[in-house]
Amino acid sequence: MHHGEEHNCCGNKKHGHEEAAHSCGCSLEKKEAKSCCCSGGHNKKVETCCGGGKKLLSEGKILWISFFALVASFLIGEFVQPAGVLRLLDFAWIAIILCGLPIAQSAWKALRDERKVNSPMLITVAMIATICLEAVFVFTGSHEGGHGHSYLFAAGEIAFLMALGEFLEERTVAKSRAGIERLVSLAPKRAERKAPDGAFEEIDAKDIKVGDTLLVRPNTIIPTDGRIVSGATSVNQANMTGESVPIDKAVGDEVLGGTMNESGAIEVEALRPESQSALAKLIELVEEAEGKKAPIARIANRWASYIVPAAITLSIVVFFFARFVLDTTTTDSFVRAVTILVVFCPCAFVLATPTAIAAGLGNVSKRGILVKSGGALEELAKVDAVVFDKTGTLTTGEIAVSSFETDGMDGDEMLSLAASAEAFSEHPIAKAVTGFAQRKNLEAAKAENVKSLVGTGVECDVGAHKVKVARASVFEAEIAYSEKLKKYYDGEKSKTVVGVEIDGKLSGLISLSDTIREEAKPAISALKEKGYFTAMLTGDNGGAAAGVAEKVGLDKVYHSLMPEGKLAKIAELEGEGKTVCMVGDGVNDAPALASANCSIAMAALGNDVAIETADVAMMTDDLRKIPSLLRFAKQIIFTIKSNMLLSLAISFAAIALSAYGYLDPVLGALVHNASSVLVVTNSARLLKTRWK
Ligand code: ADP
Ligand code: MG
């Protein structure tokens, strides 16, 4: 009912409740819930302010009052059995007004504003019909067969059960949202900034500017993404990643806004304003994800628009069927027709998908995994091939230079030129080269006209020199000319090798080694055990690729691929009828991530490309979560399907029973809502499901 009241105003916590079923009688006023007076820093989408006054009663109170009114109505019907016009003075009116009126209002609003006849309308019609039924009985004096209970009780009960069902559903969705609420609550509000005179002043986190020096005290939340300029500490990222081991950080290391600074006081230079921090981005994405419905939800919504005409038609058919085929009395046929209206509303069916997805996503987000849409879950459940990027995905991405060789040039000179070029690349190889040069205390001049050769390397001017650092395969012809380099290259076949070209001439080769992630092998064995096809797509050379593939036990390896090549391989696998899930880190594999049926980005926290391109962003880099996630996605889809089947079966049974007079509006409303509660409970189990 009135979702607006409790949460919205200004807690800065709960936002946008639009996820669950609109099309059912059970969740009506959600749209209004969006507009309220939150001044919270985070949600830019917060809309208009609440013009309307506060409601007098909370949702819970309305339900309790209605419940007691109905009990009173029942007891009076049972023991007092008032006669004549007195029957119309029933306590059930309280429930009809408190619970039923909002339903009628929203039905009317949908009709007026959107020209839509929806299921609330159906319920309203059913309520009015039951009330009329009672009125007709009272004024014609035709109380047949000792109807002790007034039909007003039935109308009140319908309204009450609808409100209750919605309340329960709302609670499931709210629980599922706990993840995002936790994130939003992490958003720091205040920060301490160093003033020019060296003193620290407290400012609003919103006012942080890039370059500000901020003081972060121990056991406080870091206000925005930044780099440590003084002090050392350990940072706990559990809030965002679900990974509870604190990470040591010292001067020069980057820290993320929203994570917990544990042991030391540090000074941090802000790299981003708070509104663009990794946390802000994450919150934005989670909120967006909530709005994106699964295609499977659309079936339910499409149905909803046919429901009202179908229900009314069926109700008329049943009236004539009961009257003339089964030969019952006119009033009895009328009762059956009204019961059809009550049981026909597919509340449970409409709830089947959104509640399961909300609960499923709630569970997933607790594990530091962000699934960006319900549709992605559906794809994940269908996956039968999982392909991995190599560098940064199956390997740690912490690459180190293992050796190098030059021809006709001093080694240090080559390395320092290479480091200059790599200073601007975000590739793990670039970090390895610059780090290596730094440790050798080599000066690296500033590069100009830096051009990134995507998936191959970099090119730039350093002083008077033209420098290019790129995959060795580009230089194969030149390597063959130099005996020295050829010998070295052949010896390093199983490593990642890059070439350094200076002024159009290949001057040397650098060989790098890379560490395989510990979890890679168990993760891939788990996938293969479940029958998934596994493969690697890498831009690296065949030797290095084969080494990794063999150690982790992949089914297939595709190497020396350019970013477009990875894309083509995925298309090829999909062409073979496979549903492909691409796992990558966003470096040189974004097109592949975007084109696969679904995609998972590893260690996505703070990695904008990955977090934006992939359907699933894992905040940590634990590959073992992938088989668990795929299995859980299957479980969610199974829950949705069983919900749908269950609700349809109950609906059809109830329709048949009503037509033959085994259900009256009172029992009909009960059966109808029992199936909603069943569906919501079934979905809520997903919140608690454990992962292996
Ligand atoms: P992977 O598919 O294993 O993640 P990439 O597609 O990122 O690998 O890179 C493929 C190859 O391109 C690397 O093995 C390397 O030889 C070369 N390369 C890419 N970027 C750079 C760079 N910045 N410097 C040198 N070589 C690079
Ligand atoms: Mg990569």
Image (tube, rainbow, N blue to C red):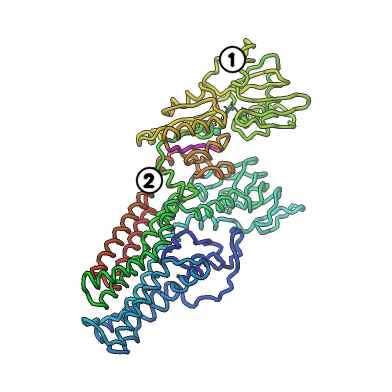
Q: Is residue 445 left or right of residue 580?
A: right
Q: Is residue 580 on the magenta stretch? A: yes
Q: Which corner quadrant of the image does residue 133 belong to?
A: bottom left
**Mark 1 lies on residue:** 488
Range covered by the magenta-colored residues: 579-585
Crowdedness near tag 2: few (<14), some (14–19) or many (≥20) residues, C-alpha within 10 Å: some
Q: Which corner quadrant of the image does residue 175 belong to?
A: bottom left
Along the viewing direction, whichever of 651 and 20 lies nearer the viewer: 651
The quadrant of the rendering that contains the N terminus is: bottom left
The spot of residue 22 in percent (x, y) is 45, 62
The spot of residue 244 in percent (x, y) is 48, 46
The dot on residue 378 is none
Check disc 2 and give the amino acid type: Lys
Along the viewing direction, whichever of 455 and 650 lies nearer the viewer: 650
The quadrant of the rendering that contains the C terminus is: top left
Dot 2 or dot 1, earlier in sequence: 1
The dot on residue 634 is 2
Q: Is residue 428 visible?
A: yes
The spot of residue 570 in percent (x, y) is 49, 33
Q: Where 86 sits versus 472, above or below?
A: below
Check disc 1 and give the amino acid type: Tyr
Main secondary structure along the magenta-highlighted residues:
strand
Residues at circles 2 and 1 in contact by the CB criterion of under 8 Å: no
Along the viewing direction, whichever of 240 and 645 lies nearer the viewer: 645
Q: Where 222 sits versus 346, above or below?
A: above
